[in-house]
Image (cartoon, rainbow, N blue to C red):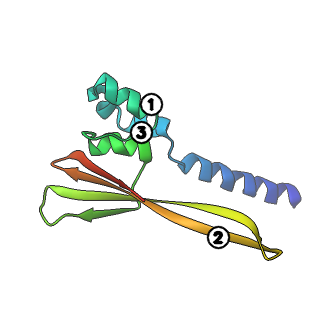
Amino acid sequence: MKLHSTWLVGLALAGLLAGCSTPASRESERAAALQSATPAQRRAIAEGRVELGFTPDMVYIVLGKPEKIERGETPNVETWIYYQSDAAAGWNGGMPDVHAHRYSSHIIFTHGKVTDILLG
């Protein structure tokens, strides 16, 4: 019975890992975007940076699927939103103190190109 449950746990982990999106897997998915990128854009993608002028496919390669997409007031504007969290631990009055900070990145596209990047 133990072998069977170990196998199921291993299979579940393999399934989770197979479903993970990585920059390399996203590059394969959006190979045309990478081929159409300029040398400077390819360098930024390889370094994990989003820059002004990127297309949605280029941003997807770097950051993956956004957690939220907001449409602008005009049909040519949309914002991709990504959330990140970090946790900090320390001591407060002799007691453990753990607190988390949540940050968001807003990637704004106008006519299919990044026109603004808001961090914070």
Residue highlighted by disc 3: 49
Mark carried by residue 99 = 2
| Image vertical order of residue 13 relative to residue 27, above or below | below
Q: Is residue 26 left or right of residue 8?
A: left
Q: Residues within 10 Å of mark 1 (few under 14, many from 20)?
A: some
The first of marks 2 and 1 along the sequence is: 1
> Residue 22: where, in percent of width, then height?
51, 42
Residue at x 64%, y 63% (from the top left corner): 87
> Residue 32: where, in percent of width, then height?
29, 31
Q: Residue furthest front?
A: 93
Do the numbered discs 1 and 3 sit on residues whose CB atoms are within 8 Å?
A: no
Mark carried by residue 13 = none
Mark carried by residue 46 = 1
Residue type, label 2:
His
> In this view of the protein, which residue sits in the foreground, 35 or 99?
99
Frontmost of labels 3 and 2 is 2
Q: On the image, which quarter does residue 45 sit in? A: top left
Residue type, label 3:
Arg
Distance between mark 1 and mark 3 Cα atoms:
8 Å
Distance between mark 3 and mark 2 Cα atoms:
28 Å
Distance between mark 2 and mark 1 Cα atoms:
33 Å
